[in-house]
Image (spheres, coloured by chain):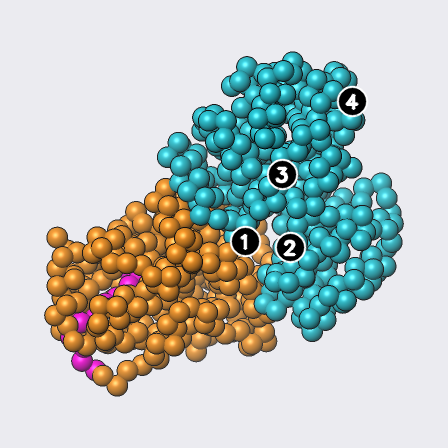
Chain colours: A orange, B cyan
Amino acid sequence: MTLDEIIKEIKNAEKIVILTHESPDGDAIGSSLAVKLMLDKLGKKADVIIPEYSRLFNFLPAVNYIKEDSKNKNYDLAIAVDCATSKRLAKGEYFENANKTIVIDHHGSNTMYGDLNYVNPVSPACCEVLAEMFGYYELDITKEIGTCIMTGIITDTGGFQYSGVNAETFEFAAELIRKGVDIPDIYKRTLRTKTKANFELTKRVIDRMEILENGKVTFTYINLQDEKEVAAEPGDHEGLVDIGREIEGVEVSIFIRQKENAQDSYKVSLRSKEYVNVSDICIMFGGGGHPKAAGALIQGNVEQVKEKIMKEIRKVLK
Amino acid sequence: MTLDEIIKEIKNAEKIVILTHESPDGDAIGSSLAVKLMLDKLGKKADVIIPEYSRLFNFLPAVNYIKEDSKNKNYDLAIAVDCATSKRLAKGEYFENANKTIVIDHHGSNTMYGDLNYVNPVSPACCEVLAEMFGYYELDITKEIGTCIMTGIITDTGGFQYSGVNAETFEFAAELIRKGVDIPDIYKRTLRTKTKANFELTKRVIDRMEILENGKVTFTYINLQDEKEVAAEPGDHEGLVDIGREIEGVEVSIFIRQKENAQDSYKVSLRSKEYVNVSDICIMFGGGGHPKAAGALIQGNVEQVKEKIMKEIRKVLK
């Protein structure tokens, strides 16, 4: 059983590093810090390396443990959380150089790139996978660990809204409330707080929103000039892709943003409502994700990138 | 015990009418239909009278029972749900003319205007109050009734986000999932579906958003002309007031919309984040609500109404 091997490797390791994907969201950071805090409880030293993240997550317990980088180049064990491929890992070199590697994730598109892989694609968040693991190991989830885990679940499910959410998710939430985890506070700080820059970007994204294909697709974008003008920081583009999908009748929403240091390259985010598998579309462009939420990097200017995606979407649109 | 008297009155009544507040939201409609379906199970005939509501709620079981009006002018029993004052009731004449009246609610500002009043101001939704009552009576909550109840809880808590949400709310959600209630579906249909008109209003509301008092207050509006241009229907203004509050640093968001058939009169919605009691402010203008979400009707043009509210907000802003 993978879970038994995982705990064995953790017990054997002296120097552990925790890694996650680039542009980390709440599930990535929550998972990283939940693992860090649990390793602490087990008496294990671990580094959490996350080069940059939204300051909205500064409320998280143990956020001060996060390092941008490390002097140590050789870890006994690297644990990657919430990351589908080794390519998407931020500071992936620590993963490559580690003696042993463990992958914990919930992406169906996970390539199983670790020595040991524990991936539950049915789980709505990597943090919920961790909660399962901690339960299996009979490890107590403290208020602090619970806050990290709940942050991942709340952000990755959009506040208990996506279809992976199940009865266990809600029971676990009830259990954590009884331990003192403040769910309304996490909710407010993550999903319901827009930075001023995010609000300014929202305004532009809505003003530019094109409603295409008889109202079934929306397209909008931001470029580096926008980000500069509103003084955008990491994370300030969060949620912008969801705006289009919320419109009645829309099946796919497309949001693209220009990549830093690259005039002709856009980070594409796709969301779908009912039947379009946007992960399949993103995989064609070298990206991936979940069936209803996925991303890729595509070369071209706004119009070219839009056409490349639209061409694929038109093929599957009913 | 009020609950015992309530069930006694229901058992004694032949003709029952269910009423709720004007501009009904998901909790108002969910509560009305949950009561209707439960009365059905108890073998009691009841009319649900709701003159108008958003078509987003057309997915609800038993929505076809809703009548705009009734030929019967004299009911044995009127049950008002989710309505703080008799003045706010839609078709309040049926309440006035009924032989007996029952009020079931969760507003702290409820004036206890019924013969029997069951009000739990700690509950995050009137639908959760109903769930408590059904539990007390040991009545089984079917999938259909659960769908109505969950709609009220999800919409009134903004998707489990507001502070009244407690461990029981989540446990109840888990229980309803096991009964087949589709929480992600309810979520999507209510909180995550914007009509095209709502999207167009959102665009205007964001474009007009003023950020005042060093970023602590936001103000925005829509008028009858806007509603006409976007062909707005009942419910199309839902959620517009929340946009301002989500901006970092904002304590109070103000959203006003012109009243139909009244040039110089605006429906005011206020939301607060941490400490301002907006219900207190709205009560000064003859309105009311919850400490962090309240409304009133104020005379004047946009600038005049804005100044009237700002004057009161400035007094309590830290």
Earlier in the chain: of badge 2 and badge 3, it is 3
Q: Please state the chain letter of the residue tagged with numbered disc 3 in the rendered image.
A: B
Q: Are marks 3 and 4 on the same chain?
A: yes
Mark 2 and 1 residues: CB-CB less than 8 Å, in contact? yes
Residue B280 placement (x, y as % from top left): 73, 55
Task: Identify which residue is drawn at 86% across, 51% down.
Answer: B299
Residue B74 placement (x, y as % from top left): 75, 17
Residue B24 placement (x, y as % from top left): 67, 37
Q: Which residue is mark 4?
A: B97
Mark 2 and 3 residues: CB-CB less than 8 Å, in contact? no
Q: Which residue is mark 1?
A: B163
Earlier in the chain: of badge 2 and badge 1, it is 1
Earlier in the chain: of badge 3 and badge 4, it is 4
Q: Which residue is mark 3?
A: B119
Q: Which residues are magenta?
A: A73-84
Q: Amino acid at mark 4?
A: Asn
Q: Amino acid at mark 2?
A: Lys
Earlier in the chain: of badge 4 and badge 1, it is 4
